[in-house]
Image: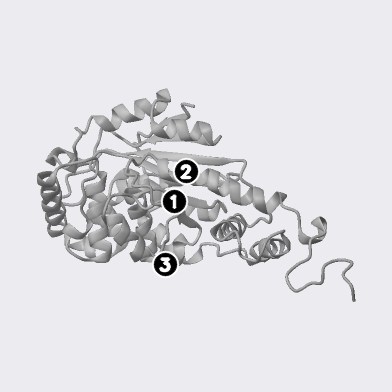
Amino acid sequence: MSGHHDHSHHHHDDGLPSLDEIRRVLPELPGPDLESATAALQREQTLLKPAGALGRLEELVQWLATWQAKAPPELTHPRIVVFAGAHGIAAQGVSAYPPAVTGQMVQAFINGHAAINQLAELHDADLRVHEMDLDNPTQDFTQGPAMNEAACARAAAYGMMAVEPGLHLLCLGEMGIGNTTSAAALCAALFGGPASDWVGPGTGVDAEGVKRKIAVVEAGLAANPSALTDPFEALRCLGGQELAAIMGAIIASRLARVPVVLDGFACTAAAAVLYKADPKALDHCIVAHRSAEPGHTRLLAAINKRPLFDFDMRLGEGSGAALAIPVLKSALACHLNMATFAEAGVAQKGERPAGAMH
């Protein structure tokens, strides 16, 4: 499954949201649909099992119902969206791979050759690859902001356009050489702590490479004091186009009633911008896995999310998020297809068995 592919080359700014408009929309985002949540819970309580026995599978069905605003929820139209972005800091040798690999990997996604293609095909998910303006990387943030306001807002708007009503689930992923360095800088700006708390090996750099990444993050924070004043300013100064697009897609999903599965470190860092602006903004999101990137554990604690898996993955591409699809489908299959106690003629806890002696 090669999936749908899209180039983004923007030359005009008319009618696109500013970051201020995104700030304004956050308090107005729709909340949980409690009616659907209650209906899912009520069905759950009648199913042929001890109460709570399916653990997180039960929670996941209720989460789907709550944020699809639909009981029972549906999962026949899951979509995986991968945003690819080019980073100016990649020139600083922060990755084990050269910057050209971003475009080469996009081509691999189109040709069906990457890990995410296999997972999308296996789990019958619609895969979309959105290439941000790879010919025009962000600025090197050790020298000043990665993006101006218009570029950051444009990338966010582009991410918003990747979501359409009628999707049952959105799995988000990214590709961008240099983006674990960008994500680390973003986390340090959002949540504080030394750069060394947030920097890890990424694609597999050695100890020297990690030191280089730490120095780049420290220089980025020093060059962008305004990044510490506001989460969207942190994204503009230290983020990337694909990270801004992920943030936009999360907002648009909330508006369109589409639950979201976040992937690893870079993806969760993009989401954390919204958490920092409004802790409720990620209630419609789950995090698929705890990445092997060490900063991810710290980040998950900061945004109060418990991942589904801990598989030592650090690939990106939305690969961890795609693995959540069969788990969600499993949860929903039990919810939809199990018999109730009454249907199966099985006595519930505390009930007398049918036809027992009185």
Secondary structure beneath label 2 = helix
Residue pictured at 75% horizontal, 74% vertical: 350
**Residue type, mark 3 in image:** Pro
What residue would you read off at disc 3? 279
Compared across the picture, whether 8 is left or right of 340 comes to: left
Q: CA distance from mark 2 to mark 3?
A: 26 Å
**Residue type, mark 1 in image:** Ala
Q: CA distance from mark 3 to mark 1?
A: 19 Å
The reply to whether residue 149 is in sight is yes
**Residue type, mark 2 in image:** Leu
What residue would you read off at disc 2? 323
* Vertical placement of residue 52 versus 262, above or below: below
Counting labels gives: 3
Residue pictured at 30% horizontal, 49% vertical: 292
Q: Are marks 2 and 1 in contact (CB under 8 Å)?
A: yes
Instruction: Of the two numbered discs 2 and 3 on the same chain, state the one appearing first in sequence.
Output: 3
